[in-house]
C-alpha cells in the first residue's frame, strides 16, 4: 500500500503506479494532520510510502527508494536519475534548491 502525498506523486506515477495494481492515494489536510500520519512519519511531513509493511518518507528518500526498488529493467521506463555519481549529486543539489523555493 502506498500513501502518496506531496511532490513525489508525479515521480511515483511515472515509475510505479502503472506497474503495481494495488495502491492507495491518500490526500491529507496539512492544516489538520491526522494521527496516522504521525504514526508513519514522526515529523508529520509528506510524502509517505508504505510498502511491504515498511514506511519510507521524505521526498528524496522516497524517490531513490522507488528508483532502486523498481529499476528500469523491471519497469521498462527510462531511468529518472543519472547513472554517473557526479550527475546524481548535481541533480540532488538542484532538487534541494527547488524544495527550498517551492515548499
Image (cartoon, rainbow, N blue to C red):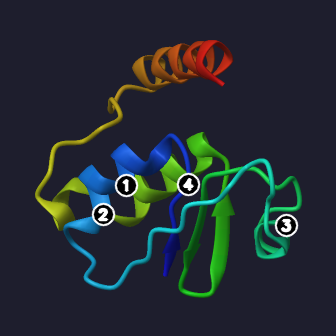
The circle on residue 12 is 1
Q: Residue at x 53, y 68 (%)?
A: 26
Q: Is residue 51 above or below residue 47?
A: below
Where on the picture, by quarter, is residue 50? bottom right
Give how far across and how far down residue 49 sits, in percent.
Answer: 57, 66
Where on the picture, by quarter, is residue 32? bottom right
Could you tell which of marks 4 and 2 lies nearer the N-terminus?
4
Q: Is residue 3 left or right of residue 83?
A: right
Q: Which residue is mark 3?
A: 38
Where on the picture, by quarter, is residue 34? bottom right
Give how far across and how far down residue 28 sits, in percent.
Answer: 64, 59
Q: At numbered mark 1, what does the secondary structure look like: helix, strand or loop?
A: helix
Looking at the image, is mark 2 or mark 3 nearer the viewer?
Answer: 3
Q: Which residue is mark 4?
A: 5
Contact (CB < 8 A) between labels 1 and 2?
Answer: yes
Q: At numbered mark 3, what does the secondary structure look like: helix, strand or loop?
A: helix
Q: At numbered mark 2, what does the secondary structure look like: helix, strand or loop?
A: helix
Q: Residues within 10 Å of mark 4 (few under 14, many from 20)?
A: some
Q: Which residue is mark 2?
A: 16
Contact (CB < 8 A) between labels 4 and 2?
Answer: no
Cα distance in 3D space between marks 3 and 4: 13 Å
Q: State how many labels appear.
A: 4
Amino acid at each position: 500500500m502506498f500513501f502518496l502525498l506531496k511532490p513525489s506523486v508525479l515521480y511515483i506515477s511515472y515509475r510505479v503506479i502503472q506497474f503495481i495494481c494495488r495502491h492507495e492515494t491518500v490526500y491529507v489536510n496539512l492544516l489538520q494532520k491526522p494521527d496516522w500520519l504521525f504514526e508513519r512519519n514522526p515529523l508529520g511531513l509528506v510524502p509517505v510510502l508504505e510498502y511491504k509493511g515498511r514506511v519510507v518518507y521524505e521526498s528524496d528518500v522516497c524517490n531513490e527508494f522507488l528508483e532502486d526498488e523498481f529499476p528500469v529493467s523491471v519497469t521498462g521506463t527510462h531511468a529518472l536519475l543519472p547513472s554517473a555519481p557526479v550527475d546524481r549529486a548535481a541533480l540532488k543539489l538542484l532538487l534541494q534548491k527547488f524544495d527550498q523555493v517551492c515548499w
